[in-house]
Image (cartoon, rainbow, N blue to C red):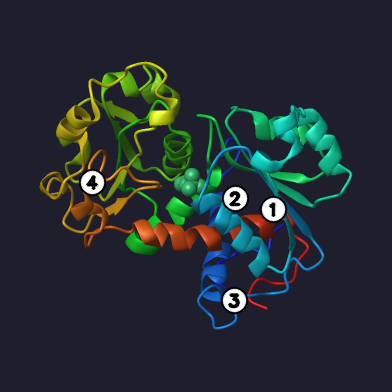
């Protein structure tokens, strides 16, 4: 494996990146490098977490996060439990507290939770003995997405430090934007967020120490990394946009607009994409796109998160 310091990981949970240092993030990314290699072998399985149990508790829909966490746990030889909320007793009105008490009695080692309420993973961490990983809570945080994005940037750019990053779109509703801003600022990136004023909270720039724009041009000019975000129609409670067509006209990421960024800039999107709204297909599928690299990085990064939190496994390269 690469530079992974063999130090005890100093956090019990991954609820957000608050309180995480550059060393903590680097430890996860270096560990993910070793697991990335494992994921490309003919036999993509190591015995690292044999005997451990990982519980996936998804109260919100997911394709990438859920499947990659499940694959990550399986590739580490952990036992996995997947609670499908839609077919569980949650549908009969069981509270999160009672669900925690019930599942806690089965002694999972780690709980991976996605929930539409900000703070739900913190609540679960208080109620259960297991370690907890936030797989996305409301508009608050999506720390493993930021970690896999950092892994992808580092692999493509060779570093995280000193890059100009543009984050475009629905900043207000985006837990991905919040976690990415926190991580990228830790490494000294010049982070520029851009979107219509209705979709960028007034104090976002100050809160995350990033530059806020309401025009694309200054955000994209000279960017090393361009990250388009999904317009979250399910969270647009009020009419915050005149229309999706108008949004696309002013803020859609096209090949023409990408000419403002550096020639070797990479294009990212956490998915799922609204093609023709926040990103044009020619860009999503174009030569600068690393969107599928992000998906591949998701498995290795989540393996690394499970490994550092559970900590007592055999070495990842075993
Ligand atoms: N990026 C992301 O969280 O995608 P899913 O909602 O498909 O998990």
Is residue 31 toward the left or the right of residue 93 in the image?
left
Label 2: few (<14), some (14–19) or many (≥20) C-alpha neighbours in 10 Å: some
Q: In 3D space, how far apart are the residues under numbered discs 1 and 2 (Cα atoms)? A: 7 Å
Q: Which residue is mark 3?
A: 44
Q: Quadrant of residue 114?
A: top right
Residue 188 horizontal side relative to residue 213, left or right: right
Identify residue for label 2: 24
Secondary element at image label 4: loop
Q: Residue at x 16, y 31 (%)?
A: 250
Q: Which residue is mark 1?
A: 9
Q: Position of residue 196 (x, y in %)?
A: 26, 24
Kindly tell me whether mark 3's CB lies below 8 Å from ligand 1: no
Residue at 84% of width from left, 42% of height from top? 104
Going from N to C along the chain, the mark reached first, 3 or 4, is 3
Image position of 227 with respect to 30: above or below:
above
Circles 1 and 2: CB atoms closer than 8 Å: yes
Q: Earlier in the sequence, mark 1 or mark 2?
A: 1
Sequence-wise, the earlier of marks 4 and 1 is 1
In x, y percent, where is residue 79? 76, 62
Q: Which mark is drawn over residue 223?
A: 4
Picture quadrant where residue 172 is located? top left
For marks 2 and 4, give the one nearer the viewer.
4
């Amino acid at each position: 494996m690469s530079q992974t310091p063999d130090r005890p990981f100093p956090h019990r949970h991954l609820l957000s990146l608050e309180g995480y240092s550059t060393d903590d993030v680097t430890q996860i990314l270096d560990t993910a490098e070793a697991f990335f290699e494992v994921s490309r072998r003919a036999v993509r399985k190591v015995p690292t977490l044999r005997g451990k149990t990982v519980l996936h508790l998804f109260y919100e829909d997911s394709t990438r996060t859920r499947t990659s966490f499940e694959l990550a746990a399986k590739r580490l030889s952990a036992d996995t439990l997947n609670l499908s909320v839609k077919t569980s007793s949650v549908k009969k009105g069981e509270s999160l507290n009672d669900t925690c008490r019930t599942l806690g009695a089965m002694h999972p080692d780690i709980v991976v939770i996605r929930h539409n309420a900000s703070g739900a993973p913190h609540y679960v961490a208080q109620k259960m003995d297991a370690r907890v990983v936030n797989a996305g809570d409301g508009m608050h945080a999506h720390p493993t997405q930021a970690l896999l994005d950092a892994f992808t940037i580092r692999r493509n750019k060779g570093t995280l430090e000193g890059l100009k990053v543009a984050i475009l779109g629905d900043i207000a509703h985006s837990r991905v934007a919040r976690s990415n801003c926190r991580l990228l600022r830790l490494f000294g990136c010049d982070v520029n967020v851009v979107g219509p004023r209705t979709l960028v909270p007034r104090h976002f720039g100050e809160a995350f120490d990033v530059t806020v724009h309401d025009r694309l041009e200054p955000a994209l000019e000279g960017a090393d990394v361009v990250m388009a975000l999904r317009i979250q129609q399910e969270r647009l409670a009020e009419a915050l946009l005149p229309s999706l067509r108008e949004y696309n006209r002013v803020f859609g990421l096209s090949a023409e607009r990408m000419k403002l960024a550096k020639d070797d800039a990479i294009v990212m999107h956490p998915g799922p994409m609204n093609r023709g709204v926040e990103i044009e297909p020619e860009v999503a599928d174009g030569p600068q796109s690393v969107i599928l690299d992000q998906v591949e990085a998701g498995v290795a990064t989540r393996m690394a998160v499970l490994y550092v939190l559970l900590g007592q496994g055999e070495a990842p390269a075993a």
